Amino acid sequence: MRLTVLGGGGFRVPLVYRALAGDPTVDEVVLYDTDERRLRVVASVLASMPLPGGRGPAVRVAAGLDEALRGADFVFSAIRVGGTAGRVRDERVPLAEGVLGQETVGAGGVLYGLRTLPVAVRIAERVRAVAPSAWVVNFTNPAGMVTEAMARVLGPRVIGICDSPVGLVRRAARAAGADPDAPGFSFDYVGLNHLGWLRRMFASPDGPDLLPGLLADPVALNGFEEGRLFGPGWLAALGSLPNEYLHYYYFAREALDAVRSAPATRGEFLADRQEAFYAGADDAPAAAYTLWEATRREREETYMAENRAATGGWERDPHDLDGGGYDRVALALMRAIARDERTTLVLNVPGGGAVPFLDPEAVVEVPCQVGAFGARPLPVAPPDEHQAGLMLALKAVERAAIEAAATGARAAALRALALHPLVDSAAAADRILTMAGW
């Protein structure tokens, strides 16, 4: 089978390629990117990286989008419109107005979406035209709104993925003494992308819910990332385990102070490190993999560093630094569809009524049954009032951004910014929009 990666020069593409090594699902990987240098460097990394079994799928670089898409069985869309420079602007413009600038959350996430959605929709249209039988796996952030916009073109053949829910579930299971890979393990998770909650967790079908005991155990909670990030006191009061990105909502003041006091934004940090990597690897292709691995390790070690600083400062656990996450989810999804190997994954798909207060076309992040038919949302417990309130607020933001990107209507873009719970002033939202070129 053929896998096409759009954004093939992206820094995390080698993680996907490494996950494919030794798996017979894919025999050819086609890379496409608008940045020739990044594409050239990533091809060098793939050619030199050590792989299980010594080899991975054949790699081909495509010169154009349609060429990349033709004949594809799966398309991974992992684009970054505007590059890291665009991310830096998304962060700095809101910070100048005293509100959070972050890649997927708050005003920064809305700005990124407004810039990305038109390109993502054009990609969906080209997939429909030249590869109508392909399955599109969307990595592109903000994943929820991008997947929903692409689904209006491709229907159920586009599926959004994120590694945050699977990481949360696995860490919580280990902390509760359960094996997340054991037969019979199950859980209940609901939300939107980067806005979800783990509400129940079972080691076996007839066993008790493990989550209440975990939430009542400060020692166990302090043994994994989300427990330390949110704190045992707040988690016990909340009664669920939030996705790590909810730290920006529950500790907005502290998170904003930490970001503003940091010597550089996350985008600035990554822009500096990745430019050094791409330049160095382009000059020395034989060292590309070694340079990539060192840069990847630093990237993982500093992930959400400001949030950890806002909660007292602590280092990430060694087993969370491997970088395997979204690549494993993507491979599991692709394998399940290609071989009809039924599995359950947390994915971003139209809810189809799984969340009763959202219409069936609204993309939600919930456990899904996956097979040759694609991904079907599984029933989940109804969100509580707090969860429902945040989900409705963020869905209104996503849909206003989709409208703005489709029509160019500034009023819709203003709604998308001003209605976000982390933007505290419509006047500030208006100024942010102006500074962003709207």
Image: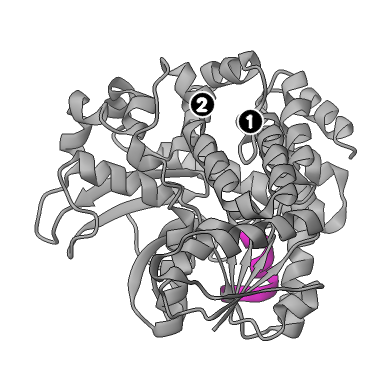
Instruction: Say whether marks 1 and 2 touch (CB < 8 Å).
Output: yes
Mark 1 to mark 2 CA distance (whole Å): 9 Å
Residue count near mark 2 (Cα–Cα under 10 Å), binned few <14, some 14–19, many ≥20: some
Residue drawn at the location 25% of the way across and 30% of the way down: 223
**Residue 234 locus on image (x, y percent):** 33, 23
**Residue 407 locus on image (x, y percent):** 85, 56
For the residue labelled by badge 1, is the local secondary structure a helix, a strand or a loop?
A: helix
Asked whether residue 430 is in view, the answer is: yes
251 relative to 279, above or below: above
193 relative to 160, above or below: above
Residue 36 is covered by the magenta coloring: no
**Residue type indicated by callout 1:** Arg
For disc 1, the marked residue is 266
**Residue 406 locus on image (x, y percent):** 81, 58
Q: Which residues are magenta?
A: 147-156
Residue drawn at the location 18% of the way across and 41% of the way down: 176
Closer to us: 385 or 321: 321
Residue drawn at the location 56% of the way across and 58% of the way down: 14
**Residue type indicated by callout 2:** Ala
Per the picture, the main secondary structure of the magenta-coloured stretch is helix
For disc 2, the marked residue is 305
Asked whether residue 384 is in view, the answer is: no
For the residue labelled by badge 2, is the local secondary structure a helix, a strand or a loop?
A: helix
Closer to us: 297 or 332: 297
Residue 152 is covered by the magenta coloring: yes
